[in-house]
Amino acid sequence: MAAATPPNPPPPDENAGPALTIINSLLIAFILITTCLRIVVRFSARALGLDDYMIAVVAVLCVVRVAIQVVQVNQFGNGRHHWYIPEYDYINNNMLGWYSMVLLFVTTCFLKISICLLLLRIKNNRTLKIFIYIIMAGLVITNFGCVVILLAQCKPISVYWTGTGGACWDTRVRIYSIYFTIAYSLLTDFICSLLPLVVVWNVCIPWRTKASVCGLMGLGLVATGFGVARATSLGLVTTDLSWAYCIAAIWSNLELFLGVIAANLALSHSYYAYLFGKGGVARSSRSRRAGYHPRSGYAYQSSLSHGGVEPPSTVITSRGRRPSISKSESSDIPLEPGIHKKTAFTVMEEYPDDSPSEN
């Protein structure tokens, strides 16, 4: 690769690598803690779903991306300007940066799909299902479209980081495709952050619970803001990738990692019930009244706080059998008011004194 002519005057010898390393270290720790807790809680409740498997894959890919970036910073001068690092290091840094970009698009796609699948577990009606499947199809097309462009842009692929031995498409093809993907990603961030609020707002739960859900979803909107910053940091100039793509990586990781953390913390009520409920998995009647469902692995607001009625999962019928658990019960969001009223009528009819005894 022929050395690019430095600007006149040259930029200062600054280094954004340490900032990238610090951000990665802090956020990857939160990702591992929240993801492991999510898997343990769901596994203990026998409620692991496709959204959980997907988020586990996302966490692994995030770790791989961070590992690549650690090598870039510590070994090849990532975060410094091109003209202050050896050409050999610059080439290897760009090679690792290419792999890191591929991981970014794949991981972002899997993260958003995991969030969409979680939304379907919260509320699964036909209209919402069609809408979310359309969103997921768009995520696959936009993100893997960028991966295809990265794979096909240069022949051979190594020309991307060596600059010799072949030819590449115009840089604008790659950059504009990334812009389009970011725009769609921002749109899905906004939609996936607001949909849970729409569901929760129509449910009879305390304002404090609604506020906590709003706060967690707001964290997703913060990640959206970092996505905007990532878009503005990209440019068509490719002569100083060791600096420009390190800045873009900071914004990308803030967007991606905060998105993972927000997706995991959306189930925080389940974690609290699991950690502090009686008997660990909260199998007692008291724990169920507190709002933890041991079979589904989800937490919900007990209807005991709204009229002294046992939640549907603890209703005992006159035959001594528990009713089947519907999809609506497998949710961190309580059942809709209409279902609560129907269940309350059944319980009060069989147990007027509100003190059922399990057989």
Image (cartoon, helix red, strand yellow):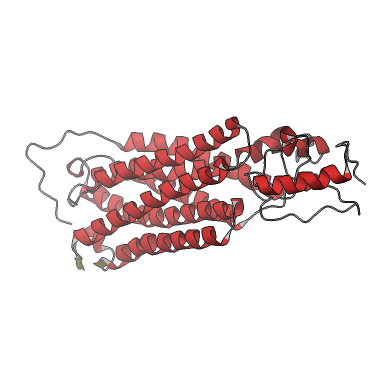
Q: Nearer the viewer, residue 183 or 251?
A: 183
Side of 14 where 342 appears, left or right: right
In what quadrant of the picture does the N terminus appear?
bottom left
Residue 281 appears in which quarter of the rendering? top right
The picture places residue 224, in percent across and down from the top left corner, at 38, 43
Q: Residue 230, how many percent across, how many down?
A: 30, 44
Q: Position of residue 107 (x, y in %)?
A: 44, 54
Q: Which residue: 29% across, 68% down?
A: 152
Tell me the quarter of the picture where residue 172 sits.
bottom left
Residue 302 left/right relative to 260: right
Residue furthest left in the image: 8
Q: Position of residue 84 (x, y in %)?
A: 19, 40
* Residue 335 showing in the rendered view: no
Report whether residue 253 is seen.
yes
User: In this view of the protein, which residue sits in the foreground, 225 or 84?
Assistant: 225
The residue depicted at 63 percent of the width and 56 percent of the height is 49
Foreground of the two, 102 or 309: 309
